[in-house]
Amino acid sequence: MKYVAIDIETDDLDFTKGNVKLISGYSEGNYSCVYEDFSKIKDVLEDKNIIKIFHNASFDVSWLTYNGIKVTNYVDTMIMAQILNYEEASLKYLCKKLLNVDLDKNLQSSDNWKDEVLTESHKQYCLNDSKYTYELFYILYAEIVSKGLLEVFNREMEVLPAMVNLKINGIMLDLKGWKEEVKVLEGKANEIEKEFKTLIGDESVNLNSPKQIIQAFQNKNIPIKSTADEVLAQFEDIYDEIKLLRKYRKLQKNIATFGYKITEYSDENNTIRPNWRQIGAISGRMSCSRPALQGVPRIMKPYFKAREGFTFVVADFSQVELRILAEVSRDKTMIDVFSNDMDLHSITASKVFNKSVENITDIERQIGKSLNFGIVYGITENGIQNQIRKNTGEEISIQEAMKYRLNFFKAYKNIYILQNILLKSKEIRSLGGRVWGNNLKSNQKLNYCIQGTGADVLKESLIEFMKVKSENYKLCAVVHDEIVIEVPKEESNKASKLLLESMEKGMGKFIKSVPCKVDIKISEKWVK
């Protein structure tokens, strides 16, 4: 198999606006070249028998795909470095650390590539990037093999085309409708601000000034010394002023983060293409920024709409992390609950409160839910207190929180055993083979195995879907445990079935003891 490292230099970061100015290829021996007409290297890029090596493949391949080149069989040295948990994954850092080369990145900015005539310095810069990418690949690959991470490597490389598909397609936002909604939100924020000032008895107080807020509270004998949200949450049900302040802050956060600012990220067709990161967290989970779709407020989601003639298929794994926990811990009680399609939160509540499931109240079920999700992440008694207050409005004592935690572990004995093993472990692994060393904090040791396996499941699902999807099915968003695709309306049922089967296969590679459950919805808006 032949390997060729590829680098492209562009005059804009956005492939829908800019141009590829240079492309270089570097391979072992005498093969090294720089092209100003990248169609000359088209055959190499599309040849399935040649492995193309990129550093940040989702950037380069998105550009090439947008320009009509179907790049096949490629790998990414940046992702390889992330698999190995390097402190940084930039080309400059890796060259210094692994090759002892001070790579000159003075021409890195796209502003340096806008001139029509490029110099020999530009060409050498482009060639150096591909040359050192080529050399890094062999070093990183050898380390991956020696550390037993080949399974992880193969998965991350196989999911690269899905990341490119995400980036190219984007998701369309009804910008006009959302702007009108933002005006409504601004009106609500103004009304809440007026109501707060009247209630607090101070028309001059600035709701965005913690210092002024604390002073206003003290003037009203409200015992608040901090305006941190977790502190305010403890007193929300006691003081209407605090409830109003939290509502105001939530509205203002949504307006500031996703209000008119969202126009910065949309093109002339109102399509938003976030900056997707394949390994966006140490746990291996994906993330995105500019904008962060994971944080989109619920009120905004219906304004993301399918293009004309298309519809969304929105699929979401149900309680995937708890199902992974059941698999990893081999806890018979939890496995039985999932295998018999019972309500885990009600079951947990019944065991914690020593009541029959039929007699569990809505609030008690919410407490069961808080425990199920909290204990996965090593929640403390104080954390249980805060979580229950936040989710139910109920106040419980530390003694009650301790009792709930103890009763949980009595009900799910193998989870207690698993957590003790993980806390003592020098190395944590996901079911998909991802590895973390002993420098993790306690809560990371408890949840990386679960979160990391969740990332493995999602990526395997994307790989499976990319194998079977039609050319006109668009991957639009992947948020937490949710996959959003856009398909022709007349093919929505077929696409829904293919996506469901792909997610079941993805989860089935790791989770054998409990069934996979996927909630799926067909809609012209991004709704669950």
Image (spheres, rainbow, N blue to C red):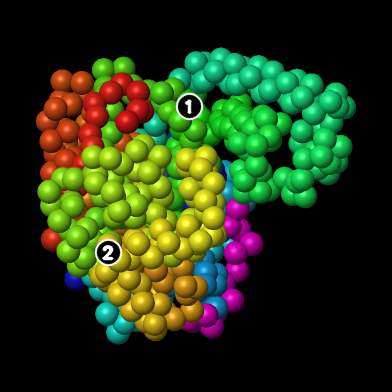
Disc number placed over residue 412 in the picture, else none: 2
At x 34% / y 55%, what residue is drawn?
352
Q: Is residue 338 left or right of residue 148?
A: left
Q: Residues within 10 Å of mark 1 (few under 14, many from 20)?
A: some
Question: Looking at the picture, does residue 427 appear above or below residue 336?
Answer: below
Span shown in magenta = 97-109
Please give the name of the residue rendered at 48% of the width and 27% of the height, measured from the top-left corner.
Answer: 300
Above or below: residue 115 compared with residue 49: above
Visible in this render: residue 476?
yes
Above or below, 280 against 439 in this view is above
Instruction: Identify the residue at image location x=45%, y=30%.
Output: 298
Q: Quadrant of the C terminus?
A: top left
Residue 41 in sight in this render: no
Chief secondary structure of the magenta span?
A: loop
In what quadrant of the picture does the N terminus appear? bottom left
Q: Is residue 101 magenta?
A: yes
Q: Is residue 274 above or below residue 104?
A: above
Q: Which residue is mark 1?
A: 300
Q: Nearer the viewer, residue 12 or 151?
A: 151
Pick the residue in front: 302 or 238: 238
Comparing labels 1 and 2, the label whose residue is closer to the camera: 2
Label 1: state its secondary structure.
loop
Which residue is at the front of the view, 195 or 65? 195
Earlier residue among tags 1 and 2: 1
Q: Helix, strand or loop at disc 2?
A: loop
Query: Left or right of 28: which side holds 59?
Result: right
**Residue 57 x %, y %:** 38, 56
Residue 344 pos. (x, y %): 26, 49
Please name the amino acid that badge 2 sits on: Tyr
Residue 157's image quarter?
Answer: bottom left
Three-letter residue code for mark 1: Met
